[in-house]
Amino acid sequence: MQLLRILKLVSVGILCLCIGQSCTTKKTPTPALKSLTVVIDSNFTSESLNERVLVSTKISKKDLTRPDLKMWITQRTTKVSQKKDAIMVGDFRKYPEAWFYMQVINTSHTSQKLVVDEFSRIRCDDFEVFTSNNGIVQYWGKINRATRFASYPLPFLTYAVPVTIQPKDTLNLLIHTQRNYGNHEVNLSIASYQTYVDRHLYLFLSKIAQVIIFIICIITMFVLGRIFRFKIMTYLGYYLISLLFFIVSCWGFVDFVLKATSIGLSGNNAPTFGLFVACCLNHPFNMELMKPVPKNEKLFKGISYLLMGTNLFASCCFFLPKHIFPSVDAYFFLSKIVLFFVLIAIIWVLICSLMALVRAKIYYIGLGYSIALFAILPLQIVRLLDKSPSLIIIDLPVYTLFTIGFTLITIYMLREQLVSRKKMEESLQQERESMEEIRKTEVEVIGRNLHDNVGNILVSAMGYLHLNSPKIELSQELIKESINEIRFLSHNLVKDDDAPLHTKLESLVSRFNDFMEVRFVFEDYSKGKLNSLDSIMQQNIYMIVQEVFTNIVKHAKATEVFVQVFEREGQTLQVIVEDDGIGILNFTENKGIGLKNIQKRADISKLTLTVDSTPSGTMFIIETPKIA
């Protein structure tokens, strides 16, 4: 519990740091931009534009024909965060559109075919490119989420528009972007046509490979989970589906499916929806992973269900009608709160991983999560400390590694479970064989008692009746003795296999009190915890107590027998059978069939059996292994 409290404090501290960093209103000065020109020559390959462009949200298309365009835009720039990896314009409600300006100079003697692109696509919904030269505006193309793939200028699902610049020419390049949901962020670059095609062919094949890996892992999880009834694989399968949806929505693969829906879910916000669903489906999978770990179950399940429920509620908001969803989104800030939920999920799985390692020496949970989390989390923290916008870092290959990692881990867990199940079945088979051997021995003892004791008594009674002067009273006593012996043996054959152990012991004591002069007393001070033991252990304890009763009645000459159950320091249970008889003479040497069977039953269920015999009585102590 102390460790859990410390982890809670650390988690709250990290969370407060992240929230405080992301919510800060302190404005940082925009760093000095590099040259606003890109020089194109015969050796040009590619160049990032994020730190080279002027950004304005205060101009329109009609201003593009101005001869003093550069000066006009310079006087109407908007201060935004321009980093090497991205330009953060701001929330779409304040900045639904933005213009990016720079000059492109061709110093070569040949025309150059270039490609202007927005690399990320995730937080940009509309992308179009213009050039202006001496007041003459040329429109090169437009791509948005509703554009059909056949209409894309290049055979890739990317925001990329080809542009041609003539030899020794200078063009004013203008990029216009729009955002309809969440934060408006772009990642602009310019490249030669061949460089762009080569790079994106590799990226396209990489995306296809990642999707195939996801599909193989998902199918494997569902098939193996169903065949072996291994729930953790099924839950992982659902979780991987949500991650796959998140990835393909970031790539724009679902834009065509969601462009004409009547609900709030669309291509603009599909990645946000995918993150909520992934955060929700992570918890059933994580709860199955944590089953072997000792913990406060009530607290653990409460936190897991609370986090799962909040993410589920947020996910359901996207299925509201299209005219209602914007109001709900504006009230709950879904595009911003998803960051909070992702950070909470990361902190929670880290806490669970530490608990598994410290309390159960289970390392594979932390190993599986670290593949993804420790690749993303440091980047996210660096971005926060660098005063960059606190958006989710999306490193898609990391999710593929995470998928492969946890697929292999769950297969390893299944293998361990199958090996453990096989060992358990072998152990159970050995127990059955041992118990069958004990049963046969007990049947032989009962048969011998019937033949030797009851049979001899009845023969003696018959002999007294056939005398010339029959001894009727003596014969009656012998017959009564044989009846009691038969009654005693029959009571020992009574089965209560379906009853809990507490009830079976009460019934056993009651039966012996019915026909024996010895007084039997049963007291349970464990509050019925005997009934929580596994069924085989309960049966063996019952049979041991029954055999001890038999030995007491036959040999101990006792007047009272006490059966008591105690809980020992909350870890083990003790069943103590104590009598006031004459004890077991030469105990170390006198180990008949009954005592041997008692020891065999104790060994089967790993019970500790202690016998303390004195001339004033005998005590049998049966102690269980540690209870859960």
Image (cartoon, rainbow, N blue to C red):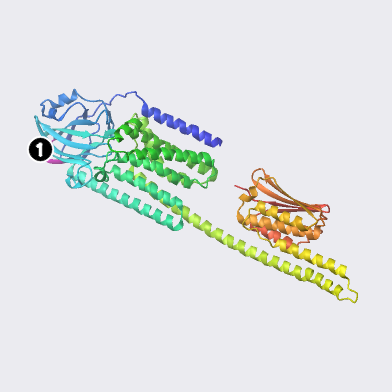
Q: Where does residue 141 sit, x and y in percent of width and height?
A: 15, 39
Q: Position of residue 16 (x, y in %)?
A: 43, 29
Is residue 44 at all visible to an observer of this figure?
Answer: no
Residue occupying the point 10% across, 38% down: 167
Residue 414 visible (yes or no): yes
| Quarter of the figure with the N terminus | top right
Residue 229 as seen in the image, left or right of residue 452: left
Kind of residue at badge 1: Pro
Label 1 neighbour load within 10 Å: few <14, some 14-19, many 20+: some
Is 367 left or right of 192, judged from the image as shown? right
On the rendered structure, is 120 left or right of 542?
A: left
506 relative to 249, above or below: below
In this figure, which residue is indicated by the disc labeled 1? 167
* Magenta segment main secondary structure: loop
Q: Which residues are magenta?
A: 106-113
Camera-side residue of 63 and 197: 63
Q: Is residue 173 magenta?
A: no
Identify the secondary structure beneath mark 1.
Answer: loop
Asked where in the image residue 468 lies, by quadrant, the reply is bottom right
Q: What residue is drawn where x is 27% and y is 45%? A: 254
Q: Position of residue 220 (x, y in %)?
A: 39, 55
Q: Which residue is rendered at x = 73% and y = 64% of the image?
A: 489
Name the quadrant containing residue 398.
Answer: top left
* Residue 110 part of the magenta segment: yes
Figure disc tally: 1
The x and y percentages for residue 212 are 32, 52
Viewer-proximal residue among 416 and 307: 307
Instruction: In the rendered view, tell whether residue 211 sits above or below residue 395.
Output: below
